[in-house]
Amino acid sequence: MKKTFDAVAFMRMRREEIDREDAGLTWKQKRERTRQTLEKDTLWQRLRDRSVQPAPPGVITAREKTEVDYGKSNG
């Protein structure tokens, strides 16, 4: 099966583009640029006010496991 999209290569390329675009900007300017970019994004507009309710008392929301099972079969 031939890979049609290389996500790692894409992210590396995009990070380099962003670094070039942000060259010479202060952290404050970079933050403002990011905020302005997000404000134009339709997905961000839908999700920005969404909140996740906390789990009720007694409900475990994280799996705690001490044994490492890398490479082990579940069957």
Image: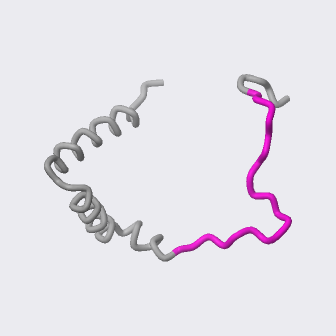
Residue 16, relative to residue 21: is it above or below?
Answer: above
- The outermost residue toward the left is 24
Quarter of the image where one finds residue 15: top left
Indicate the quadrant containing the C terminus: top left, top right, bottom left or bottom right: top right
- Total label count? 0
Q: Name the residue: 41% across, 66% down.
A: 43
Residue 35: percent from left, percent from top: 30, 66
Q: Main secondary structure of the magenta part?
A: loop
For the point 22% across and 44% down, the residue is 19
Q: Percent position (x, y) of residue 30?
A: 24, 57
Which is nearer the eye, 26 or 38?
A: 26
User: Which residue is pictured at 78% across the width and 45% down the height?
Assistant: 64
Q: Position of residue 49 (x, y in %)?
A: 48, 76
Q: Is residue 41 magenta?
A: no
Residue lying at 17% horizontally and 43% vertically, measured from the top left: 20
The segment highlighted magenta reads 50-69
Q: Is residue 9 above or below residue 32?
A: above
Nearer to us in this view, 5 or 71: 71
Left or right: where 49 falls relative to 40: right
